[in-house]
Image: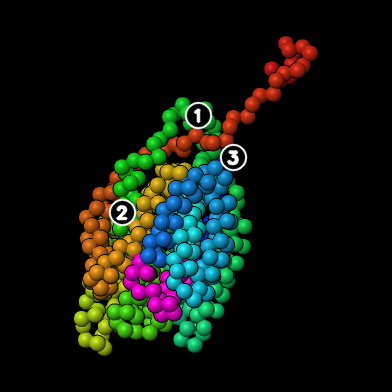
């Protein structure tokens, strides 16, 4: 398969896909307090649910990078998106915890594949645009999460039955995503013309190792940010209901608050990336995030009437602070023209933070309580502030790399059968 640049309509389609995936993820994140209230998951079983999802994603992401390189990102997304929606609809209708936990592993497989496919599509779109666009795309992701979670919270407040609401929301988002994925052009977006399509040229340069310390470091920075984001996605609502004693609808609203501030910052993010040096921007983001988690940690011990207000402010600041870390990391990597296999290294490490972080929080919550477990993302924010600026500086100094040789075999020459080999037109 020859490589191809994104078609003119692709950036719009990719942006819309980010919004749709945000809506689908909102059904999961904002629906967790509802599922917890329905079957009484508790911190231990909820941690196990998140662990199975994380394991599925960990298995899927490296494989998805290989499949995206061999076939295309679009092919991966066309399978993973509708499958994820069907699985989430099934989980949302479950009356017991055990089948939820089993299906979460398969749902995690789909989530991992979606993350790899969208990341590769977004970096290719930014290269084609010649200017920062990734933060805006992720802004639509968070906008979708805000709209989805807000709509779900409103329906729950109106007395809607969660056994019907959650599957309906998942299937609606899945139908939209499937239609959008069908509009993506087929082509390995991680390659450039004249490189991977030409095995002899690539071989002469020698393949660049798929794993390097810089790629691992980039993934680790992203992982720290995704632990914070995962804390909000999977635990902000539970923290609101179990620690602060609010109703499930209030938990869904807290989830929406986090992503609302993240959305605002991301829509301004591409302009900020152009105006502020990336290491400085990452350091400032970490500082804002740390302040947010200080407020979340303080919320259970302030006056009862102010608890929700303080927690809301904390999750809002945490959302604003984490908004640009991942766009900065993958935007820097996009300039190196990594093929999907190399990009999946960073994606796997980074997104595993989002999947495994909530599991670790659940484990801590079982021992020290959920209120104390929020110290984990706060501590990682301190590490993020120390490690991210020099790592981002290193990423910006990376030279563009050549893709690994294409797995497509070189076409064999047809043997000559011309009566006169000296005048054979194939030899001319």
* Residue extent of the magenta highlight: 24-47
Q: Position of residue 372 (x, y in %)?
A: 23, 71
Q: Residue furthest right?
A: 419
Does residue 141 appear anywhere in the picture?
no
Residue topped by disc 1: 201
Disc with the residue nearer the chain's start (3 vs 2): 3
- Left or right, residue 192 beside residue 185: left
| Residue 392 belongs to magenta span | no
Residue named by callout 2? 221
Q: How many numbered circles are shown? A: 3
Q: Is residue 3 left or right of residue 379?
A: right
| Magenta stretch prevailing secondary structure | helix
Vertical arrangement, residue 333 with respect to residue 94, above or below: above
Depth check, front residue: 364 or 275: 364
Q: Residue at x 49, y 62 (%)?
A: 107
Report the mark closest to the observer, 2 or 1. Answer: 2
User: Which numbered circle lies on residue 2?
Assistant: 3
How packed mark 3 is, by other alpha carbons closer than 10 Å (few <14, some 14-19, many 20 or more), is: some
Residue 325 vs 159, above or below: the answer is above
- Circles 1 and 3: CB distance less than 8 Å? no
Q: Position of residue 189 (x, y in %)?
A: 52, 47
Is residue 36 rendered magenta in the image?
yes
User: Dividing the picture into quarters, in which one does residue 44 lie?
Assistant: bottom left
Q: Nearer the viewer, residue 128 or 200?
A: 200
Q: Find numbered disc 3 in the image and state the secondary structure of the residue it sits on.
A: loop
Name the quadrant of the N terminus.
top right
Q: Residue at x 27, y 53 (%)?
A: 388
Q: Pinpoint residue 57: horizontal percent, then vertical percent.
A: 44, 56
Q: Position of residue 13 (x, y in %)?
A: 56, 59
Residue drawn at point x = 40 percent, y = 47 percent: 345
Q: Of discs 3 and 2, which sits in the foreground?
A: 2
Q: Within 10 Å of the Cα at label 1, are there few (<14), some (14-19), or many (20+) other Cα atoms?
A: some
């Amino acid at each position: 398969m020859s490589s191809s640049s994104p078609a003119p309509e692709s950036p719009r389609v990719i942006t819309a896909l980010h919004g749709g995936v945000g809506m689908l993820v909102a059904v999961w994140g904002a629906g967790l307090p509802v599922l917890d209230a329905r079957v009484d998951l508790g911190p231990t079983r909820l941690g196990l649910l998140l662990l199975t999802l994380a394991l599925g994603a960990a298995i899927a992401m490296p494989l998805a990078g290989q499949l995206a390189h061999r076939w295309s990102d679009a092919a991966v997304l066309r399978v993973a998106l509708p499958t994820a929606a069907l699985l989430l609809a099934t989980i949302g209708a479950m009356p017991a915890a055990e089948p939820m936990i089993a299906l979460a592993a398969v749902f995690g497989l789909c989530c991992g594949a979606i993350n790899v496919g969208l990341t590769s599509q977004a970096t290719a779109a930014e290269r084609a645009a010649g200017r920062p666009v990734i933060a805006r795309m992720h802004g639509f992701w968070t906008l979708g999460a805000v709209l989805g979670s807000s709509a779900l919270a409103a329906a729950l407040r109106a007395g809607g039955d969660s056994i019907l609401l959650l599957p309906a929301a998942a299937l609606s988002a899945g139908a939209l995503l499937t239609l959008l994925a069908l509009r993506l052009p087929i082509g390995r977006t991680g390659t450039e013309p004249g490189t991977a399509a030409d095995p002899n040229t690539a071989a002469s340069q020698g393949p660049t190792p798929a794993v390097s310390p810089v790629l691992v470091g980039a993934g680790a920075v992203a992982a720290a940010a995704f632990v914070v984001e995962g804390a909000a996605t999977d635990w902000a609502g539970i923290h609101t209901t179990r620690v602060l004693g609010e109703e499930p609808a209030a938990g869904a609203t807290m989830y929406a608050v986090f992503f609302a501030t993240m959305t605002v910052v991301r829509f301004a993010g591409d302009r900020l990336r152009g105006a502020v040096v990336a290491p400085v921007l990452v350091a400032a983001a970490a500082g804002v995030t740390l302040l947010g988690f200080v407020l979340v940690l303080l919320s259970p011990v302030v006056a009862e009437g102010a608890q929700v207000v303080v927690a809301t402010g904390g999750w809002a600041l945490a959302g604003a602070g984490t908004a640009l870390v991942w766009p900065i990391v993958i935007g820097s990597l996009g300039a190196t023209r990594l093929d999907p296999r190399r990009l999946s290294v960073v994606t796997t490490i980074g997104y595993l933070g989002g999947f495994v972080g909530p599991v670790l929080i659940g484990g801590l919550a079982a021992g020290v309580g959920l209120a104390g477990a929020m110290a984990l993302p706060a501590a990682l924010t301190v590490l993020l502030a120390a490690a991210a600026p020099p790592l981002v500086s290193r990423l910006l100094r990376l030279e563009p790399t050549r893709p690994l040789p294409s797995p497509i075999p070189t076409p064999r020459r047809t043997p000559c059968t011309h009566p006169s080999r000296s005048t054979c037109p194939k030899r001319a």
